[in-house]
Amino acid sequence: MNVIIADNQDITKEGLKSIIPTYIKNPTLFFAEDKKQLLEKLVSHPDALVILDYTLFDFTGIENLSILGIKYPCMHCILFCEELSADFIIRAAAEQFISLISKDCTMKEISNGIKSASKGIQFICEKFSSLLIKRDNIREKSVLTPSERDILRLIASGKTNKEIAEERHSSINTITTHRKNIFRKISVNNVLEASKYAVKAGIVNPSDYYI
């Protein structure tokens, strides 16, 4: 398997060079110290696993990586960085060809990440995953009122508009209006998406998830 190590820190390059053969059988390693060299290597090896410290290269945004993903659909990219902003992590995680691993992860997480990415499976380490969850919770709490949170909880538990109206001593029309507003605020289109959102945001426990 072709592996491009795109990093200009000697300690990182030597470390990855040492451990990659442990997790990937018969890897062919290439090195890129800047964006230009990375692009040149991808032209020759479009199916490579790229291990990239995004913060050390002159990319202008996640859009640059998205374009690479379209141009080289067989590539998988591990962003191997110390720190990334929550906004960047959210956008990067939406790209299935991008995995996210922090340089201060344990060796176990790093090895699991490399193994998954080498198979084309997205991996997000615990550190970056926790930032995603925290961001989602903050976003959810800021857009939904306490009443809407409770209604979303009831929706996720499988209750109908009629049942929710009876439980909350409201009219069906009122619950229907709340439901539309909740879906609009959290950008979902159906009960399945709303329920998944409720679980992820901690509004309901996974064991109470109806669908």
Image (spheres, helix red, strand yellow):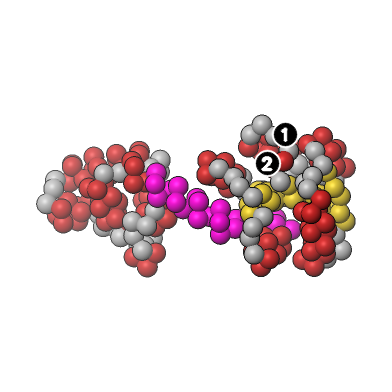
Q: Is residue 84 magenta?
A: no
Q: Which residue is mark 2?
A: 55
Q: Amino acid at mark 1?
A: Asp
Assess disc 1: are there few (<14), some (14-19) or many (≥20) residues with their C-alpha within 10 Å of its C-alpha: few
Marks 2 and 1, how far apart in space? 8 Å
Q: Quadrant of the N terminus?
A: bottom right
Instruction: Give how far across and how far down residue 91 sits, in percent.
Output: 56, 41
Q: Secondary structure at mark 2?
A: helix
Q: Which residue is mark 1?
A: 58
Q: Nearer the viewer, residue 123 or 155?
A: 123
Task: Identify whether 16 is placed above or below 176.
Answer: below
Q: Which mark is residue 209?
A: none
Which quadrant, please, contains the C terminus?
bottom left
Is residue 51 or residue 2 the one in the foreground?
51
Q: Residues within 10 Å of mark 2 (few under 14, many from 20)?
A: some
- Amino acid type at circle 2 is Thr
The stretch of residues the image draws in magenta is 117-139
The residue drawn where x is 33% and y is 56% is 203
Can you see residue 69?
no
The main secondary structure of the magenta stretch is helix
